[in-house]
Amino acid sequence: MPHLEGLGFAVDWGDRVSYWREDPAKVAALRVREDARAILIARDMPVLHKNGPGLDALLPIGEIEALGGAEAEALLGLQPDGAPVFAALLPDGAVDMRSDSSDGFRDLRELVAPGREDLKLIDLRSIAMSGLVPQDQAAMLAAAKALMHWHARRRYCSNCGALTEVAVAGWRRDCPACKALHFPRTDPVVIMLAVDGDACLLGRQPRFPKGMYSALAGFLEPGETIEAAVRREIREEANVACRAVQYFASQPWPFPASLMIGCFAEAESRSVEVDGVELEDARWFTREETMALIERRHRDGLTAPTPMAIAHHLLKHWAYKGVRFA
Ligand SMILES: [Zn+2]
């Protein structure tokens, strides 16, 4: 995978030590270490510590108890300096909601931890967009948020309805009644740039910020290859047929638990027919126009996603380096 400057949540932050998860004594020993840190999630939102003028996503492990204990915990891994990091899901009651002006694209809930002026809850998209924490911390937050989102909604066995128990250091939930084992989900999404010569196909979802165009995207379905999903989505959303599909790079996208699989697709024609449901518009952009989108100087004020999102890097790679299909 190429190094993509600024791509959110995609950096290596340490060692997941997955081989220790089934050793409760080992996990407990890490949990009581002086240098152990916790990433806290409450109502799907990270809890950050105000650290002078900056913000810190890694809190002392003792904050879990100080804030009333966790409903679920997971060993995320070890940082490069060896310090253990845990993720914890705080009960909803640990924070109060002051207001909610969410618009369907951004999470604009104002959550506060009562009596804790030193803590600040900020939604992960804003944290990443504004670079409020270092990239490795943002990647840890992504893992913690996706995992805790799953714990918060999978308390009961989907097979028999019994209450499940947290197992293997927070990476599984086991049903004591029917013995089913439940694993956290990652939902694969294909996101692709269809290209033809010196033009690429971009679309707009109705919920996008005004004037923003991006690569088309959609969920991979059971029994489907990445290549087939790419072709199907482009055909469904814009009625463009594609030949070759080429993988580019991937990005964890914890909204709530996706993996974005970035690809290029070789379009067979430039006719476009928008489905009007998922997309409100789709059109071809020339290479020059695409550069203008990326550099935020498009003559009609149109924009493309920021470097935090893989769509930006698909556009940039194609516009400046070009793509050759095998
Ligand atoms: Zn069960």
Image (cartoon, rainbow, N blue to C red):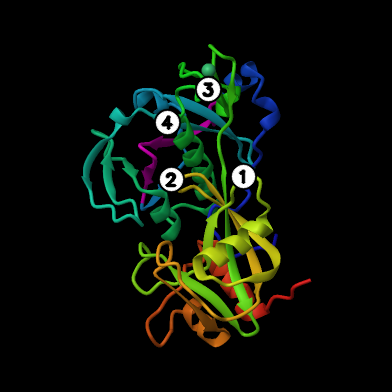
Q: Write down the quadrant of residue 114 in the picture.
A: top left
The residue depicted at 51 percent of the width and 47 percent of the height is 137
Q: Of callouts 1 and 3, which one flags the residue occurring earlier in the amino acid sequence? A: 3
Mark earlier in primary sequence (4, 3):
4
Disc 1 vs disc 2: Cβ atoms closer than 8 Å?
no
Q: Is residue 263 left or right of residue 50?
A: right
Disc 4 versus disc 1: distance between alpha carbons?
Answer: 24 Å
Which dot, 4 or 3, sits closer to the camera? 3
**Res 30 seen here:** no
At label 3, the amino acid type is Asn
Q: Where is residue 117 drawn, in percent x and y?
A: 26, 40
Task: Say above or below: 282 vs 103.
Answer: below
- What residue is shown with label 3? 159
Image quadrant containing the C terminus = bottom right
Residue 99: horizontal and vertical position, in percent?
A: 21, 46
Q: Residues within 10 Å of mark 1 (few under 14, many from 20)?
A: few
Q: Nearer the viewer, residue 44 or 26?
A: 44
Across and down, in percent, residue 287 comes to 57, 84
Cα–Cα gap, marks 4 and 2: 23 Å
Label 1 sits on a secondary structure element that is loop
Question: Considering only order in the chain, which callout, 2 or 4, is on the residue closer to the N terminus?
Answer: 2
Residue 56 bears which disc, if any?
2
Q: Amino acid at mark 1?
A: Pro
The verdict on label 3 being within 8 Å of ligand 1 is yes
State the residue at coordinates (61%, 40%): 79
Relative to residue 323, is residue 109 depicted above or below? Answer: above
Dot 3 alpha-carbon crowd within 10 angstroms: few under 14, some 14 to 19, many 20 or more:
few
Q: Which residues are magenta?
A: 33-52
The circle drawn on residue 297 is none
Q: Nearer the viewer, residue 275 or 312?
A: 275
Q: Which mark is residue 152?
A: 4
Q: Earlier in the sequence, mark 2 or mark 3?
A: 2
